[in-house]
Amino acid sequence: MLQEQEAHAAEMERTFIAIKPDGVQRGLISEIVSRFERKGFKLVAIKVVIPSKEFAKKHYHDLSERPFFNGLCDFLSSGPVLAMVWEGEGVIRYGRKLIGATDPQKSEPGTIRGDLAVVVGRNIIHGSDGPETAKDEINLWFKPEELVNYTSNSEKWLYGDN
Ligand code: IDP
Ligand code: MG
C-alpha cells in the first residue's frame, strides 16, 4: 500500500490556471472553479491580482513576436485576474482539455471556452501548456509560501488506496 501511495504521489502534478479579466468581469469565477473542483483536482493556491503590463509581457514572453502580443498584454493587465494553482494526476494536460481550444469558435461544447466564450481575444482563461511552462508560470505568479500542501479528504475516493 505504501508503494501505491508513493506511486500516486509521484504522478501528482501542478498547473497554473488563470481566469483573465473578461472571465472575472463576466462573473464566471465560480463556474470555472467548480469545473476543476468537481473533476477532482485540488486547489493549492489562489489570489486576485491586477498584473502590470511588464508582468503580462513576462507571462506571455513566448508570444512576443506575434502581432497580437501588445494587445494581449494590454488586455491581461486591464483588470483583475484570478490566479490559481491546481494539483492532481494529469492536471496539466487534462486542464487544457477542460479549457478547450485557444479559439472558442473551435472549442468543443462542454469545454470552458466552448461553453462560455466566443472570440480568441476574449477566451476568458489561461492554462499552462506543459510541465516546463507550468513550473515557470507557477514561479512567476506565486511565492513558494503561497502554495499550500494538504491532503484532501476526497483523495482516497478519487485515487483509491489499495
Ligand atoms: P492558449 O491560451 O490556448 O495557450 P496561446 O497560443 O498560448 O493559446 O495564446 C495565448 C493567448 O493569446 C490566447 O489565449 C489568446 O487570448 C491570445 N491569442 C492567441 N491567438 C490569437 C490571435 O490570433 N488573435 C488574438 N489573440 C490571440
Ligand atoms: Mg499558451
Image: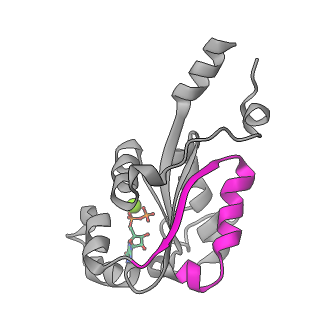
Q: Position of residue 90 (x, y in %)?
A: 56, 39
Task: Tell which residue pokes out farthest to the right in this image.
Answer: 157
Against 2, residue 76 (above or below) is below
Q: Position of residue 157 (x, y in %)?
A: 79, 34
In the rendered view of the protein, which quadrant contains the C terminus? Answer: top right
In the rendered view of the protein, which quadrant contains the N terminus? Answer: top right
Residue at x 77%, y 40% (from the top left corner): 154
Q: Nearer the viewer, residue 147 or 162?
A: 147
State left or right for residue 159 relative to residue 63: right
Describe the colour scheme in one phrase: one colour
State left or right for residue 15 relative to residue 155: left
Q: Position of residue 8 (x, y in %)?
A: 61, 26
Please state the total of marks drawn on the protein image.
0
Q: Range of the magenta residues?
A: 22-50
Against 66, residue 26 (above or below) is below
Q: Is residue 107 magenta?
A: no
Q: Nearer the viewer, residue 24 or 144?
A: 144
Q: Position of residue 83 (x, y in %)?
A: 49, 65
Q: Quadrant of ligand 2?
A: bottom left
Residue at x 65%, y 67% (from the top left corner): 32
In the rendered image, is residue 118 in sight?
no
Task: Tell which residue pokes out farthest to the front in this image.
Answer: 145
In the rendered image, is residue 70 in sight?
yes
Against 90, residue 19 (above or below) is below
Residue at x 72%, y 31% (from the top left corner): 159
Q: Nearer the viewer, residue 61 or 152?
A: 152
State left or right for residue 72 relative to residue 95: left
